[in-house]
Image: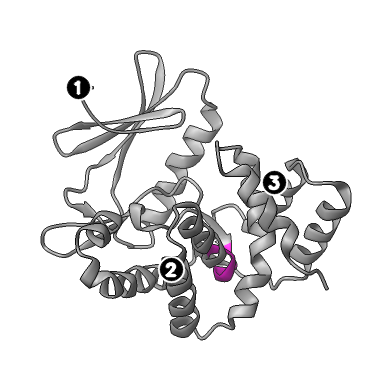
Amino acid sequence: MKLEQVIAVKPNKTVYLDGDLAIKVFNSGYSKADVLNEALNQARVEETGLPIPMLHEVTKVNGQWAIVIDYIHGKTLAELMEENPDRYDEYMELFVDLQLKIHQQTCPMLGKLKDKMNRKISQSSLDATTRYELHTRLERMPKHNKLCHGDFEPRNVVIREDGQAYILDWAHATQGNASADAARTYLLFWLNGDIAGADKYIRLFCQKSDTAMQYVQQWLPIVAASQSVKDKPGEREFLLQWANVMDYE
């Protein structure tokens, strides 16, 4: 296993390319439970038949945990959108269609989205009154068991030269309500500075899934609050604003 060619550096992890394999090496001190959970998520989603990289092994490299999966040769949808702005709408159609394909699947052994969100809202720095309102709103939302990606954005879709799309990064996969997953994607467009893309995405998602936009919007403060605990630089303040701006009924 060669760790010579770095292809991505992310918080707490570095991804290397070795032939047709991608080796994700986690920093020392990274939770073993989180590494094993990510690998387990990947293995469980593989069983749905969705186009995703195959998991090969979980191992240790120089004392650090690592996950080895297929490397998908191609360009991310984000790169293609930037390189071909005239085809942006076409790529957005593909992006939403892929997400809807995810939501058509069930993966009964995955953790539940509602449980994860309740836990993260409790961990947030929001005041007790806001946390109570968010927990209450979350409890009222319909319980579904659809496969949810949890971090679905154009950077996590790779298109091979033959046109086949692959969906990457299943670390945050859960089973739950598809509109919560859509709310997360909408916020990711905002966080990446693509406000026009966020608007185009949410309209297309609602149109294709026959979902009321107001329903997805009801998820926004819940999703924002649950994501704020990641405490990423520049994200936390933005997400907490979303968690506070919605009018609770």
Kind of residue sitting beneath label 1:
Glu
The quarter of the rendered structure image containing the C terminus is bottom right
Colouring method of the image: one colour
Place residue 193 in its image quadrant.
Answer: bottom left
Query: Looking at the image, can residue 50 be seen?
Result: yes
124 and 18: which is toward the camera: 124
Q: Is 29 on the left-hand or right-hand side of 196?
A: right
Q: Is 194 on the left-hand or right-hand side of 231?
A: left
Query: Looking at the image, can residue 149 be seen?
Result: no
According to the picture, the residue beneath numbered tag 1 turns out to be 4
Magenta span dominant secondary structure: helix
Residue mark closest to the camera, 2 vs 3: 2
Per the rendered image, the range of residues in magenta is: 176-181
Q: Residue at x 61, y 37 (%)?
A: 231
- x, y (%) of residue 47? 38, 57
According to the picture, the residue beneath numbered tag 2 turns out to be 196
Place residue 196 in its image quadrant.
Answer: bottom left
From this viewpoint, which residue is outermost toward the right? 129
Q: Within the magenta stretch, is there residue 207?
A: no
**For mark 1, does the 10 Å Cα neighbourhood hold few (<14), some (14 to 19), or many (20 or more) residues?**
few
Q: Within the magenta stretch, is there residue 180?
A: yes
Vertical order, 59 against 97 (above or below)? above
- x, y (%) of residue 61? 33, 18
The quarter of the rendered structure image containing the N terminus is top left
Dot 3 or dot 1: first in sequence order is 1
According to the picture, the residue beneath numbered tag 3 turns out to be 120
Vertical order, 170 against 163 (above or below)? above
**For mark 2, does the 10 Å Cα neighbourhood hold few (<14), some (14 to 19), or many (20 or more) residues?**
few
Total number of numbered labels?
Answer: 3
For the residues marked 2 and 1, what is the alpha-carbon distance in whole angstroms? 38 Å
- x, y (%) of residue 183? 56, 65
Q: Is 211 on the left-hand or right-hand side of 169?
A: right
